Amino acid sequence: DIQMTQSPSALSASVGDRVSITCRASQNIDSFLNWYQQKPGKAPNLLIHTASSLQSGVPSRFSGSGSGTDFTLTISSLQPEDFATYYCQQSYSTLALTFGGGTKVEIK
Amino acid sequence: EVQLVESGGGVVRPGGSLRLSCAASGFTFDDNGMSWVRQVPGKGLEWVSGIKWDGSSTGYADSVKGRFTISRDNAKNILFLQMNSLRAEDTALYYCGRGGYNYNSRRGSPRRGSYTDVWGKGTTVTVSS
């Protein structure tokens, strides 16, 4: 299976900060990378698919970039409702669509 | 309203079986691949299984292969996950999702790029003696 490694595993930031989360795949996955946000007690919510395509209804402060093995999720100006855990997921494999370990974004 | 509602979770002894269901509404069920994702409380997400829109192709995580079986009833808009030989490590919240499964076409070319854009609220499975 393709392994996905996210960093950092947690970060502290303030409202208004620019935040970046990285995700690395164990092999080339082209641009087949999704990002999800999960708040406590809730199901995940799709933010970005295919590395940089913003899902309908998701604020434009979220953006994704990268291809091959290295990807980044950026929040341009952190808002109170953005404090959550973020997961990347590769969508290249036809065997299993593996997730990264998650990045928890906490209030500084 | 687009909705997925899971059911069938519960407490089961190691070695036992359970069948999860996911009732879909508000969208054309048989136009979509479907998947199951689980999450141990306080831990990350784990993709478990997926199925093509017509049920002709399925996939499983190595951790459940040979023990779990995914299926669907397109006439009733229901997704299933049959879980056999359950282990303590299968204890988790199980989410049903629209999308989230890649497959190979009949000609063998891969269909990549799936994502899960609709999620249920989950059903809890506890495996304990």
Image: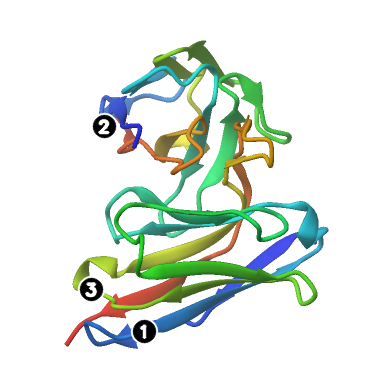
With A71 as the anchor, is B40 left or right in this view? left
Q: Residues within 10 Å of mark 2 (few under 14, many from 20)?
A: some
Residue behind mark 3: B87
Q: Position of residue A31 (x, y in %)?
A: 55, 18
Compared to residue B129, the image places residue B127 above or below, namely: above
Residue behind mark 1: B17
- The residue type indicated by label 2 comes to Ala
SS at mark 1 in the image: loop
**Which chain is indicated by disc 3?**
B
**Which chain is indicated by disc 2?**
A
How far separated are the C-alphas under marks 1 and 3? Answer: 10 Å
Q: Position of residue A25 (x, y in %)?
A: 36, 23
Residue behind mark 2: A10
- Disc with the residue nearer the chain's start (1 vs 3): 1
Is residue A17 at least partly visible in the picture?
Answer: no
Q: Residue visible at 28% across and 76% down? A: B86
- The residue type indicated by label 1 comes to Ser
With A28 as the anchor, is B92 left or right in this view? left
Q: Name the mark on residue A44.
A: none
- The residue type indicated by label 3 comes to Arg
Q: Say how the picture is coloured.
A: rainbow
Q: Nearer the viewer, mark 3 or mark 2?
A: 3
Is residue A2 at least partly visible in the picture?
Answer: yes
**Along the line of sight, the residue nearer the viewer: A41 or A26:** A26
In the image, are marks 3 and 2 on the same chain?
no
How far separated are the C-alphas under marks 1 and 2? Answer: 36 Å
Q: Are marks 1 and 2 in contact (CB under 8 Å)?
A: no
Q: Residues within 10 Å of mark 3 (few under 14, many from 20)?
A: some
Q: Residues within 10 Å of mark 1 (few under 14, many from 20)?
A: some
Q: Residue visible at 49% across and 40% down? A: A37
